[in-house]
Image (cartoon, rainbow, N blue to C red):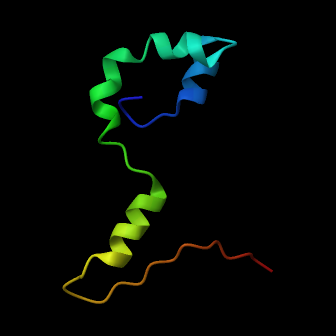
Amino acid sequence: MENGVGLRYIQELLGHTKPETTIIYTHVAQKDLLQVRSTLNIVVKKITTPAKREQNVSIARHKKG
């Protein structure tokens, strides 16, 4: 979790059937959770923060074909 890996992935790696079991082991990383930013938060910040130069931000995927 400290490296940004989601709880669900950690649950699978540890072989836990319930997320509650995995959460028991995450208490040591709680302080770092406040620093984790989602992709949406990063995009919103880029859109709303004035930049020194113009930036293009894409939030959609392009289909090939």
Task: Say above or below: 51 vs 37.
Answer: below
**In this image, 12 relative to 6: left or right?**
right
**x, y (%) of residue 8?**
60, 28
**x, y (%) of residue 6?**
52, 34
Task: Say above or below: 21 vs 7.
Answer: above
Q: Quadrant of residue 44?
A: bottom left
Q: Where is the C terminus found, in terms of image quarters?
A: bottom right
**x, y (%) of residue 64?**
75, 77
Q: Where is the N terminus found, in terms of image quarters?
A: top left
- State the count of labels: 0
Which residue sits at x=55%, y=23%? 10
Which residue sits at x=57%, y=10%? 21
**In this image, 54 relative to 1: left or right?**
left
> 33 or 65, which lies in front?
33
Task: Say above or below: 10 vs 34.
Answer: above
**In this image, 15 relative to 24: left or right?**
right
Which residue sits at x=18%, y=85%? 52
- Furthest toward the right, the residue is 65
> 47 or 13, which lies in front?
47
Q: Quadrant of residue 49?
A: bottom left
- Furthest toward the left, the residue is 52
Task: Say above or below: 59 vs 14.
Answer: below
